[in-house]
Image (tube, rainbow, N blue to C red):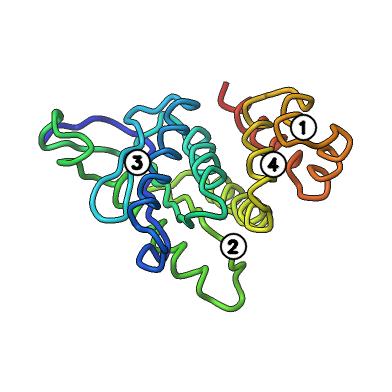
Amino acid sequence: MIALGRTVALLGDVVSSRRHPDPAAGRGLVGDALALANERLVATQPLTPTIGDEFQGLFPTVVSALEATLVVRLALLGEVDVRFGIGSGELFAYEVARAPFEQDGPAWWAAREAVDLVRDLSQRNEQPRGLRTRWVDADGDPPLVVAAVNAYLLSRDELVTAMDPRDAVAMLGLLADEPLTRIAEAEGVSVSALSQRAIRGGLYAIRRAQLELREAVA
């Protein structure tokens, strides 16, 4: 077994995949969303479909993993529902050449715990039903840091859940720093109308939050 050091693992799965009207098309959409996240973000190990309805990847920071989950969810909004678990900790490999398989260790255990927590919490009446993302740190990062990130995710996921597909397209544009004029033109609306929708839907708040997180690890 080879020790690969501390990393951030991202584990995702499709919610209620058997209920999708066209499972093959759904898998294609997931593949496209993963490709978009891989294009936009620097991953240690690109997001890759694995077994069944799951996909996984490795990232250098929690912040990049958080943004990857946001990009994937936005790209699939209205078509395929997905949940994510992020785990930080040590990573081990039995056979490096067989990545993403043949890997184990606290990073993956924490990611599995996180995605199981999302599944459990989202089914409780007192919890926001829009929750789709959670972070678990295997090495005991400061509890306030972990709690703050998960509190942000609760709010972020609720805002994303309330979006429609047009909002999601605009949000993806904002995350890529595209000019508002270009996003509005692509959607066939005025800049003013798009800006008002972005304010009401919390799109600017999500972008600002993600920018602050990026700046914190820059």
Give the amino acid at mark 1.
Answer: Ala
Mark 4 → mark 3, Cα distance in angstroms: 27 Å
Q: Nearer the viewer, mark 4 or mark 3?
A: 4
SS state under label 1: helix
Mark 1 → mark 4, Cα distance in angstroms: 18 Å
Q: Are marks 1 and 4 in contact (CB under 8 Å)?
A: no
Name the one closer to the observer, 86 or 33: 33
Q: Label 3: how many residues lie within 10 Å, few (<14), some (14-19) or many (20+)?
A: many
Disc 4 marks which residue? 206
Give the amino acid at mark 4.
Answer: Ile
Closer to the N terminus: mark 2 or mark 4? 2
Q: Residue at x 69, y 31 (%)?
A: 174
| Residue 64 position (above or below residue 132) | above
Mark 2 → mark 4, Cα distance in angstroms: 15 Å
Q: In x, y percent, where is residue 83?
A: 45, 56
In the rendered image, the residue lying farthest to the right is 192
Closer to the N terminus: mark 3 or mark 2? 3
Mark 1 → mark 2, Cα distance in angstroms: 27 Å
Q: Residue at x 45, y 40 (%)?
A: 33
Q: In x, y percent, where is residue 103?
A: 19, 41
Q: Label 2: how many residues lie within 10 Å, few (<14), some (14-19) or many (20+)?
A: many
Disc 1 marks which residue? 184
Closer to the N terminus: mark 4 or mark 3? 3
Disc 2 marks which residue? 130
Closer to the N terminus: mark 1 or mark 3? 3
Q: Are marks 3 and 2 in contact (CB under 8 Å)?
A: no
Mark 3 → mark 2, Cα distance in angstroms: 27 Å
SS state under label 2: loop
Give the amino acid at mark 3.
Answer: Gly
SS state under label 3: strand
Give the amino acid at mark 2.
Answer: Gly
